[in-house]
Amino acid sequence: MRSVKKLRDTFGSLQNLWNHSQIHLVHDGFPWVLREITESIADALNEHGYARASASPFYHFLKSPLIHFNGVTPTQAFKQKKVIMTWYHVLEEDKRLLNLQTLAKQVNLIHTPAKTTMETLVAAGFPAERIVVLPAGIQTTDFSRVDADKRRAIRLELQISDTAFVIGSFQKDGCGWGEGMEPKWIKGPDVFCETISRVKQSHPVHILLTGPSRGYVQHRLEQLRVPYTHRYPASYHDINRFYHACDAYLISSRLEGIPMALLESWATGIPLVSTQVGMVKDVAIHGQTALLAEVGDCDKLAQHLVELIEHPEQRERLTETAFREVKKYDWKHLIHLYWKHLYSPL
């Protein structure tokens, strides 16, 4: 399997022979969040004239003097090139921690969007002065808020009652790319379902799921007799309309780097309930831009959702403040910080 991947990567990298970018960003090749972030950074660097930038999953034969591995770990050293690696979160028993000394020789800087990740890496022995903490961004032009008529039309298309209180969950929380019956515990699918079971005791809800590998959550919701709708968007950009069908979004993760739903819910005007993980812990303000709970606290998460169900005015306050806040995380603003603190020093 490794030899097949190596052959594919080498063959795909032939295009780099004609790549004259100054900064090349490497993503994992899947048509979802990592690719979207990587291409957004490259586009912003080009648009603002900082550097000629390109993005792809391929990194062999590169002439670019600076390579940025975004969520991808370098597998080799690059002579006469500067290397950045974005490390979103540190997994439990993360094997990369065992090779930190080797990694320190392969990369010039590690970038992370979460202070908790930085703290873990420093505790494991990576030099603090070579870690840059910068938040992840979003293309706010790809997201929008909608009025009641448009929301009603989207729900009609999805066959969801206009009177239902819809809670969204758009993450991949199953292992692999199949049915997802084996849960990815760091994403907290069990916490999500336990939270919904508590809300259901006092208020009927409808769950809107998107993405692959949601089998575990679907099975649990069926056991709870909670109605749900599952769709698989054709592309990342289609996710906007699914937010429009929601009344609230729930992040139940135990471990995260970003997560993107933080910024996406803010940009679409959907109130957010979340555990304090990753970038959420760094930038969200409880009671102002989100309702927050400690990791694994199903009771508190459920309490927050019930509060949103019973107090529409609270939903309005949260979404208005969050919508103003998300503008500072637009790539057209963030790219200046990325250039100043990440790329320019190299």
Image (cartoon, helix red, strand yellow):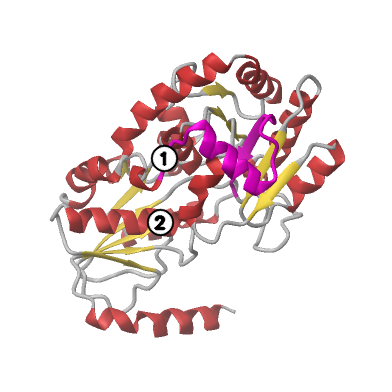
Judge left or right: residue 225 versus residue 269.
Answer: right
Residue plotted at (62% across, 35% down): 252
**Element marked by disc 1:** loop
Please identify the quarter of the rendering in which residue 221 is found: top right
Quadrant (top left/top right/bottom left/bottom right) for the N terminus: bottom right
Judge left or right: residue 79 versus residue 245.
Answer: left
Please name the residue that numbered disc 1 is placed on: 144
Q: In the rendered image of this protein, does residue 91 appear above or below residue 165? A: below
Residue plotted at (23% across, 48% down): 342
Judge left or right: residue 331 versus residue 179.
Answer: left
Q: Position of residue 328 (x, y in %)?
A: 29, 33
Residue nearest the observer in this picture, 247 or 18: 247
How many numbered dots are placed on residues in this image?
2
Task: Kindly identify the amino acid type of the residue bearing the numbered disc 1.
Answer: Ser
Q: Position of residue 262 (x, y in %)?
A: 47, 36
Residue 199 visible to the viewer = yes
Residue plotted at (43% across, 78% down): 9
Please name the residue that numbered disc 2 is placed on: 36
Q: Position of residue 334 (x, y in %)?
A: 26, 41
The magenta segment:
143-171
Q: Position of residue 336 (x, y in %)?
A: 19, 43
Rounded to the nearest angstrom, the CA distance separating label 2 from label 1 is: 17 Å
Mark 2 or 1, which is nearer the eye? 1
Name which of mark 2 and mark 1 comes first in the sequence. 2
Quadrant (top left/top right/bottom left/bottom right) for the C terminus: bottom left
Residue plotted at (83% across, 43% down): 222
Please identify the quarter of the rendering in which residue 21 is found: bottom left
